[in-house]
Amino acid sequence: MSQLDIEKEVAAANKMLTGASVNEQSEWLIDKLYSAFSEARRGKLDTVNEQRFEENREIELIRLAEVVQKRTYVPARSVAFIITNPTPREIFAASFRDRVIHHFLIQQSGHFWDKRLSSRSFSCREGKGVLYGVRHLENDIRQATNGGKEPAWVMKIDIQGYFMSLPRQYLFERVCWGLDRQFKDGGYVYDICKFLWCQIIFDDPIDGVRLKGLPSDWDILPPSKSMFHSEKDKGIVIGNLTSQWMSNMALDPLDRFVQFELDCKWYGRYVDDAYFVALTKDELIDLRFKVMKFISTMGLTIHPKKFYLQPVNKGIAFLGVVIYPGRTVLAKRLRQNMRQLKRDIDKFGLSKNHIESVRVYQGLSVHYNHKKTLVDIFGNQILREVSRWYYSS
């Protein structure tokens, strides 16, 4: 189904259900929650949380629809833990029940936002992910340098403690801004979505959180990257589908400011990581000052130590690769991750998770012409086993 068809279907449902009986509204809600459940369970079939929900899914979905209908839904407590690959990061894993709600919200409004978002926003969008972002930067450098014949400069910035610094009131205003335009006359679906977004955004994830691992696991994490050190009424958790979408909603005004008010045509953003390409160094310095001033109105700041400004011929690291005029190579950290994966395989054997990770690297090697690197790190035997499993599954 196309985005336009989905948009029409949601609009028609909103019109039909506004003023309908409670039973009709509940039937629609259960049906849509089942659809969201089907999406949420993808990739989660091996988790205990999903299996428990699956065992009594009809009862669980009816109960979930009931608390949403009565406006008594409250997010369950999350499980917080630290991951170290590719970099140390704090994750708050939502319960499976809440994941169903997250997918329901995106099914209702994701199409509206995806149509509005800039083509230069590369995160959490179908067909517009990592590879799409890399290709855009390659093309921007190609255009700026006239095919590598002329000099150009590139700048990359990072927003400091982005997820932990986002003001929740600002996020809710952005969500409501979208809902008010998607559902111009309000209505049943509008009210349901607004209620659920409110519950998710203003829920304090620290309250009642369960820690997985040791408290000392957090020692490697800077305070700016932890919800436990966020200011009051600021921050959203990393790991939820709704958080990924809210990060795009929050910075959509920045994308429009850069592209339409600053008239910067060589620009791209992946979550809080943005690049700018220009013909001169002074242009980029001026852009940085204006961007800093703009995002300060959102309560955000540019990370002082994650700022890069250099000629394009020196290469720029972006989304796991380093891009030069005319060529793209795997970044050092990505190769290190591949070597660590090989050490894990040697130590523990080739598991399903290992196979899936190797498949990701195989895909990258095809796109970036680095099959030799793959063979040098993993060896032909492991690659053959991975291919045999993939084609037989």
Image: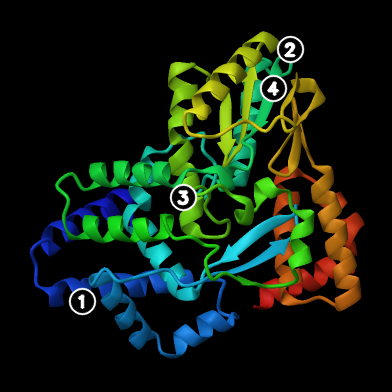
Tell me if mark 2 has few (under 14), some (14-19) or many (20+) residues whose alpha carbon lies within 10 angstroms of its own.
some
- Nearer the N terminus, badge 3 or badge 1? 1
- Give the amino acid type for the residue marked by disc 2 in the picture: Pro
Q: CA distance from mark 3 to mark 1?
A: 27 Å
* Mark with earlier residue (2, 1): 1
Return the residue at label 2. Answer: 151
Q: Position of residue 337 (x, y in %)?
A: 82, 55
Which comes before the other along the chain, label 3 or label 2?
Answer: 2
Give amino acid for label 4.
Val
Q: Looking at the picture, does residue 304 appear above or below residue 238?
A: above
Residue in view at x 55 percent, y 47 percent: 231
Q: Which residue is mark 3?
A: 245
Name the one closer to the observer, 310 or 203. Answer: 203
- Alpha carbon distance from label 2 to label 1: 62 Å
| Residue beneath disc 4 | 154
Dot 3 crowding, Cα within 10 Å, few <14, some 14–19, many 20+: some
CA gap between label 4 and label 1 equals: 53 Å
| Mark pair 3, 4: CA separation | 27 Å
Q: Are marks 3 and 2 in contact (CB under 8 Å)?
A: no
Number of the label disc, if any, that sits on residue 27: 1
Question: Position of 86 compared to 288: left or right?
Answer: right
Q: Secondary structure at mark 1?
A: helix
The amino acid type, in three-letter code, at marker 1 is: Glu
